[in-house]
Image: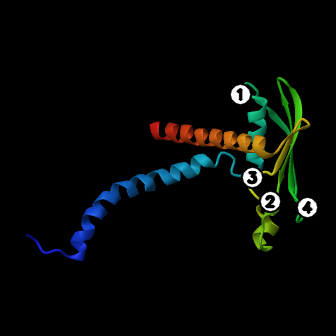
Amino acid sequence: MPPITPASLLAPQARQQRPRRSLVTALLPIAFLVSCGNPGEDVRITLCKDLVRGQLGSGATPTWSKVTTQTPGYQDAVIQLGWTAPSGNGAARCYYPYNAVDDTAQQLADPLTAYATSPSKVIINGQTLSGSALARAVAEAMRHQGQQLLDSAGQLIQQ
């Protein structure tokens, strides 16, 4: 029987983890590329758009006519959207609470980074989503984003 050494104890673990590491290493760049659908668009804007899409229903595909952001210091940031769709024109506002501990150079370069990534209130065509209705809408938008990520990654893998 061979002697037991620290290296011999670690060898089985290393062999078991190597395939997992290889898979993760291969999939990370794909996930990163797929998740960057519009690398110039802030995640708060993307989430606001997805919340609107979710509330309009699966048949509606809005064409965005207005996207503006307001970052009024320590008050909520406001993202305003305007759109046209087969069902008509619409407008929405998503409110993101201030969430920074300290002022940083990153916030000077990108003021939205000082705000939370999940809205505290959303108003779509005059209807306010808050509390549990907003939580359900955000969960549905995140589920949809995750499904898009998986679909895109699957398509890249098949190519």
Whole-Å distance between the Cαs marked 4 and 2?
A: 10 Å
Considering only order in the chain, which callout, 4 or 3, is on the residue closer to the N terminus? 4
**Can you see residue 87?**
yes
Considering only order in the chain, which callout, 1 or 2, is on the residue closer to the N terminus? 1
- Which residue position is annotated with label 3? 118
Residue 6 against residue 135 in the figure, above or below: below
Amino acid marked by disc 1: Ser
Amino acid marked by disc 3: Ser
Residues at discs 4 and 1 in contact (Cβ within 8 Å) = no
Residue 153 against residue 4 in the figure, above or below: above
Describe the element under mark 2 as helix, strand or loop.
helix
**Can you see residue 67?**
no
The scheme the figure's colours follow is rainbow
Residue located 17% across and 74% down the image: 4
Q: Position of residue 80 (x, y in %)?
A: 87, 46
Whole-Å distance between the Cαs marked 1 and 3?
A: 22 Å
- Which residue position is annotated with label 4? 72
